[in-house]
Image (cartoon, helix red, strand yellow):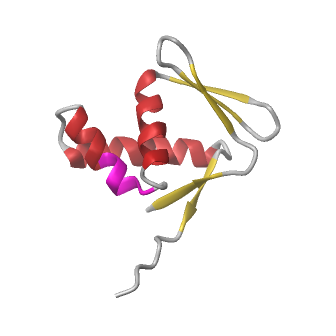
Amino acid sequence: MNIVIEAGVTAGIAEDGALTLLSPQGAPHFYAPEASAMWIALRQHGGNVRAAAAVLGSAWNADVSAVGRLLRKQVTDWQRAGLVKASPAPVHAS
C-alpha cells in the first residue's frame, strides 16, 4: 500500500519527539514519538508502507511484520482523520 498526504496537511515534531498533524481545516492531531518515526519513514519512502516498515523494523530491531501491522494501523487512523489517503502503487516499467 502507498499513501499520500492530503493537500493542506502540515506536520510538526516537538522537542520530545511527539508528532502534531494539522488538518487542512486547522484541527490538530497529536501522536506519540513512535508515530513521528512512522511519518518520517513514510515521507522518506514516498508513502510506501512496506518500505517504511522494513526500515523501521531494522532501526527498532523489531519484527518487520509486526512493525508493518503497527504502521498500517497508524495509517488507518490518519486516513480516518482525513490526513492521508491510499494511493495506487507506482507502476514500474519492465
Q: In this view, which residue lies farthest toward the bottom?
A: 94
Residue 26 falls in image quadrant: top right
Q: Residue at x 73, y 51 (%)?
A: 7
Q: How many numbered discs, if any?
A: 0
- Residue situated in front as seen by the camera: 81 or 45: 45
Q: Quadrant of the N terminus?
A: bottom left
Q: In this view, which residue lies farthest toward the right?
A: 25
Q: Position of residue 12 (x, y in %)?
A: 61, 26
67 relative to 28, above or below: below
Residue 66 falls in image quadrant: top left
Residue 92 falls in image quadrant: bottom left
Q: Position of residue 58 (x, y in %)?
A: 20, 40
Q: Residue at x 56, y 16 (%)?
A: 14
Q: Residue at x 52, y 71 (%)?
A: 88
- Residue situated in front as seen by the camera: 82 or 40: 40
Q: Position of residue 78 (x, y in %)?
A: 57, 43
Q: Which residues are magenta?
A: 48-53
47 relative to 30, above or below: below
Q: In this view, which residue lies farthest toward the top?
A: 16
Q: Residue at x 53, y 56 (%)?
A: 3
Q: Position of residue 54 (x, y in %)?
A: 26, 48
Q: Quadrant of the C terminus?
A: bottom left
- Residue situated in front as seen by the camera: 9 or 30: 9
42 relative to 21, above or below: below
Left or right side of 63 for 19 = right
Magenta stretch, main secondary structure, is helix
